Amino acid sequence: MGWLSRIFSKPDTQTTQAPLNLSWFNTDMHSHFLPGVDDGARTMDESLAMLHKMQEFGYQKCILTPHIKMDMYPNSEADLQLRFLELTQAMDTAGLTIQVELAAEYYLDDHFLNRLESTPLLTFGPQRYVLVEFSFVNPPVFEIETFQRIIDKGYTPILAHFERYVYFHGSLASAETYRAMGVNIQLNLNSLSGHYGPEVKKQAERMLDQFTLDFVGTDAHRMDHLVLLENHLNVPHLKLLNERLLKNQSL
Ligand SMILES: [Fe+2]
């Protein structure tokens, strides 16, 4: 179309949105794509559809982090590995080329401390990263000691979605304390899209402004979460993330 016809043509009635390109993150390190093991993907088909969407976003790799939380999701590492094998076989059949690795999202409680002593944890990356989460309701106690025990065992802890813990809202002091001792901080991309509410979004933007974060993750449980990202993750946030070096790129 020439410049004259562009000027005089009718404006488009439909907005054509460019596909979301997150290829520069390289790896998503927090997701619930493993089917039927937690509150994430329920079926193999759902799982494959979500992984296909991640491939469309340009991700090269997804670390799958199903919950291990004894009161709600009493998954064992061995059971998750079997399910993971089924998923990789289904991915081969479906022709998906995105890489996947199995890890977990460990809930920090007494069960975790026992597991830490008795079982090799599911990790990712050469630093043997272990993704952990706190209660959303009760502020953590003895978390410094717990983080130190994880580090002493040769792992590198990553605290999941720091911005979602309401008891930390308004301050990044705890994140700074944790980082100073070698804990990595992860942000959910959908916190920036407003999915978890305005206060979580504010805390996420504070983390981004001060760059108090090491990793970003989708924490996607359902296709809806990926569609939200596609429709609501805004360009200034992405630009800010793109300007900083995230550890996702090292995985
Ligand atoms: Fe999660």
Image (cartoon, rainbow, N blue to C red):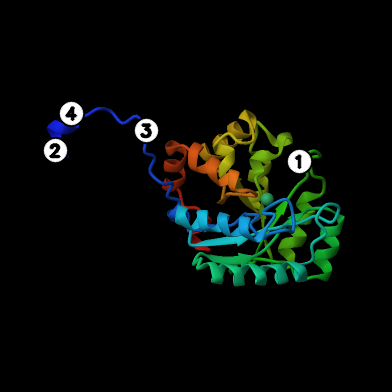
Q: In the image, what residue type sits under mark 2?
A: Gly
Q: CA distance from mark 3 to mark 1?
A: 41 Å
Mark 3 and mark 1 residues within 8 Å of each other at the beta carbon: no
Q: In the image, what residue type sits under mark 3?
A: Gln
What residue is disc 2 on? 2
Question: Which residue is found at the position 45% from the left and 51% from the top?
Answer: 22
Q: In the image, what residue type sits under mark 4?
A: Ile
Q: Secondary structure at mark 4?
A: helix
Q: Which one is closest to the eye, mark 2 or mark 1?
A: 2
Mark 3 or 2 closer to N-term?
Answer: 2
What residue is disc 3 on? 14
Q: In the image, what residue type sits under mark 1?
A: Phe
Mark 4 or 2 closer to N-term?
Answer: 2
What residue is disc 4 on? 7
Question: Which residue is found at the position 61% from the left and 29% from the top?
Answer: 198
Mark 1 or 4 closer to N-term?
Answer: 4
Q: Whole-percent x and y of residue 121?
A: 73, 67
Q: Whole-percent x and y of residue 68?
A: 77, 58
